[in-house]
Image (cartoon, helix red, strand yellow):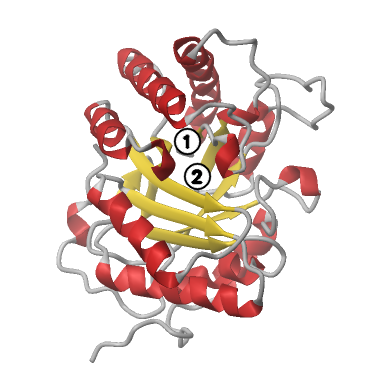
Amino acid sequence: MAEAPATGAGRTPSPGSPLCPRPARIGAAELGGERVVVAVATTAGAIDGADSAGDSGSALAQALAAAAAGADLVELRLDLLSSPQAAGPQAQAAFWHEAVLAVSAVLAPTGTPLLATARSRREGGGAAMDPREQAEALGALIDLQAEHRAGHAVADALDVELSTGALTALAARAHEAGIAVVASSHDFTATPPDGEMLERLERMETGGADCAKIAVMPRSEEDVDRALQVTARARACLSIPVAVISMGERGRRSRLEGWRYGSALTFAALSADPAAASAPGQPTIAALLSHRDRSKTGTTPGGFPQAD
């Protein structure tokens, strides 16, 4: 289980910082520490070599390019890989396991940690599984990773969608295997009411997640503002790191400025090519890192809760 480092004890979160009472360690990356963690996701359909759909590069090449570009974390999108027609969750898990081993091995020398994600179609991904099948496949993947941990590089963290209904059980299994859990929830059509977004984040913490993440689609600038305010409110009341992302071009500022409201994690693309983005509205990693480096956490954040 990824436990909060001792250095986090006694630190008081300050306005304009993702700092939280229980930081999560994912390899070398600290979510909920002094600065926002920048992740880059793979989008290739093949582990090694161009796939039949014509995606540029491979998951291996993209992972290495992300590490070289300065990503704090690489997300391997297992659901985007072109897998053989797997006969059920167990076979799918075996394919995902081999993919994780391959990418973890090439990333190991760089020191860049790996987050493994199998995004379902119901949440904007490519995994055609119902919640039960997805939970079974993820559980099998965790078991396979645990068996190979000795002497092999494996995933540092696993994404578990809240909609599987199995977060608590999967988080417990992952922690026993030494794998951190990023719980997630996605809405590609709207931005839910504030109370609903907060309730999802709270359920993730209660379910044992090390980091709680939601991504929503804004229909107006007000929706983006609401998502940022929810980030601030969640950071003030939850103990684990949170990430709230407003997607699309309209929500791009949430990816660049979310840390000012307490968001611990954001995602970038390798290039400006739309095919390089794993979700709409992602800035390039070069632009995001430049923005992060120029910014100062002491800058007055818009809307972060102030101490009474």
Among the two numbered marks 1 and 2 on one chain, the one whose residue lies closer to the N terminus? 2
Q: Amino acid at mark 2?
A: Leu
Residue closest to the far bottom = 308
Q: What is the quadrant of residue 195 in the picture?
A: bottom left
* Element at label 1: strand
For the C terminus, give its image quadrant.
bottom left
- Residue at x 52% of width, y 51% of height: 186
Camera-side residue of 287 and 50: 50
Mark 2 element type: strand
Q: Which residue is mark 2?
A: 73
Residue name at image x 39 percent, y 74 percent: 232
Task: Inspect this view and state whether residue 145 appears.
Answer: yes
Task: State how many labels appear.
Answer: 2
Q: Which residue is mark 1?
A: 114
In screen coordinates, is 63 left or right of 130?
A: right
The N terminus, quarter of image? top left
Under mark 1, the amino acid is: Leu
Question: Tags 1 and 2 in contact by the CB under 8 Å rule?
Answer: yes
Q: In the picture provided, is 306 more to the left or to the right than 229?
A: left
Expressed as whole percent of the image width and height from the top left, the position of residue 206 reads: 23, 51
Give above or below for 65 relative to 226: above
Disc 1: CA contacts within 10 A as few (<14), some (14-19) or many (>=20): many
Residue 193 placed where, x, y %? 47, 69
Packing grade of label 2 (10 A; few <14, some 14-19, many >=20) is: many
Q: Position of residue 307 (x, y in %)?
A: 25, 88
Residue sitting at 39 percent across and 21 percent down? 136
Q: Nearer the viewer, residue 298 or 219?
A: 219
